[in-house]
Image (cartoon, helix red, strand yellow):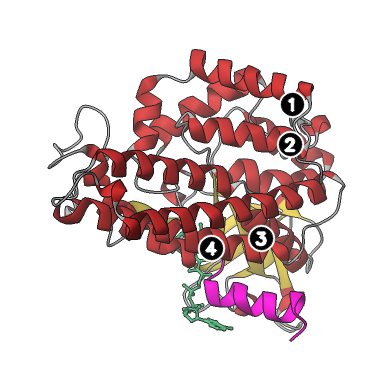
Amino acid sequence: MNMDLSPEDLAFRDEVRAFLAAHLPERLREGARNTPSVFVEPDIGDEWHRLLHARGWVAYNWPAEDGGTGWDPVKRYLFEKECALADAPALSVLGLKLIGPVLCRYGTPAQKARFLPPILDASEKWCQGYSEPGAGSDLASLKTRAVRQGDRYVINGSKIWTTHAHYADWMFCLVRTDPDAKPQAGISFLLVPMKQPGITIRPIVTHAGDHEVNQVFLDNAETLVEHRVGEEGQGWEIAKYLLENERGGSCAAPRLLADIEGLKRVAESEPSGTNGPLGAQDSLRRRLARLELEALALETTELRILADLAQGRRPGPQTSLVKLVAANIRQAIDELAVDLFGPLGLQLPPERPLYGNSAPEPVGSREAQLAMPAYLNGRAWTIFGGTNEVQKGIIAKQVLGL
Ligand SMILES: Cc1cc2nc3c(=O)[nH]c(=O)nc-3n(C[C@H](O)[C@H](O)[C@H](O)COP(=O)(O)OP(=O)(O)OC[C@H]3O[C@@H](n4cnc5c(N)ncnc54)[C@H](O)[C@@H]3O)c2cc1C
């Protein structure tokens, strides 16, 4: 694809840049910089979401007729890049990038009318009920059972690692509706209200100290049949479409590149303890240069995927490649940050958040304080959305034909 920016693209980039300069408050920038996770808390994420919604810029991967921006791939990418450079909080993917596009493609007109507007204005939040104890990589073995009774389904089972279930109004959920069919064929895709007596949420606090994930128990939980997306038994097809978006419809490279730039700046000022700044050391410069090259290569692949999406083509298994490479670069950046800060990079404050008035005092700089929480939190990158081993299996079979 042609990577040269047209005058129109440059004007768009300047427009985004000017909007960010005028409307992205420093409090939100500080919150985003000091969040050790890809998942931003609602206190900063929602405010940014609403500011973008007011500008009409919140759903860039939805068709324009469903409330999306109608941007081409270059504009989407420029937008992500400018947001990353300005330290904008990452928007929650659950509504905007996961269930939103699924509803745009598979939803009935009534489902679109009911569910899309509250995603756009952030008045309703979502969580993803795929994984179960015993069904993660082997998702098709999931056991949560939904039985149809009149105009509703009654659901029993348990979902685990459910990100932000404690904030969610709705869960998009894979359930087994036909236990006698082949595993994939017996699965349906339901939208389940979270605020009901049949749902219990148990928090899981990770080794990094963050509460992001949960176990969700469904004990005779209910949802209406009209809240099933697609037909009974079509859940697996829809689930795969959503996972392709989760793994590849993203723009990971701009944030990775922005973080690499941030580390370069720190390296230029952090003393090495022997001779000059850390940034003067060859070994460190080599690691930074290698990471930057890998992130730039990833950027090209992401742009190719965005171009495929814009042509109405599904990106297919190359999204697994992007997920794999982005996760590895993310973790290499986090490791480098810990190495860079030395002993100061080993602190692990239990308090959250690490921004705002109640944030704990850092030993050394705030960047140093963030290094270990980010490193530990970032271990999840090679697990969520499908583990590295699973992505490699998909690439081996579907790309390399092994
Ligand atoms: C921070 C975080 C957030 C998450 N958020 C959500 C969420 O919101 N919603 C949701 O539904 N899920 C979520 N997940 C769950 C995530 O998708 C699963 O953890 C992941 O798919 C792996 O499943 P598992 O944990 O059951 O591990 P398992 O599938 O039991 O895997 C264990 C190990 O075996 C390896 N393995 C398994 N199968 C193969 C194979 N075929 N070939 C080679 N190696 C294999 C894996 O790579 C892994 O190392 C989240 C996970 C994390 C860590």
Residue that carries the numbered disc 3 in the rendered image: 243
Residue at mark 2: C-beta within 8 A of ligand 1: no
Does residue 181 show up? yes
Q: Are marks 4 and 2 in contact (CB under 8 Å)?
A: no
Is 173 contained in the magenta span?
Answer: no
The disc, 4 or 2, on the residue closer to the chain's N-terminal end is 2
Residue that carries the numbered disc 2 in the rendered image: 74
Q: Are marks 1 and 3 in contact (CB under 8 Å)?
A: no
Neighbor class of circle 3 (other Cα within 10 Å; few <14, some 14-19, many 20+) is some
Find the distance from the CA under tag 1 to the CA under tag 3. 30 Å
Residue that carries the numbered disc 1 in the rendered image: 9
In the figure, 90 relative to 401: above or below? above
Find the distance from the CA under tag 1 to the CA under tag 2. 7 Å
Q: Are marks 4 and 3 in contact (CB under 8 Å)?
A: no
Q: Are marks 1 and 2 in contact (CB under 8 Å)?
A: yes
- Find residue 363 and report its image quarter: top left
Is 385 contained in the magenta span?
Answer: yes
Residue at mark 4: C-beta within 8 A of ligand 1: no
Q: Which mark is residue 342?
A: none
The disc, 1 or 2, on the residue closer to the chain's N-terminal end is 1
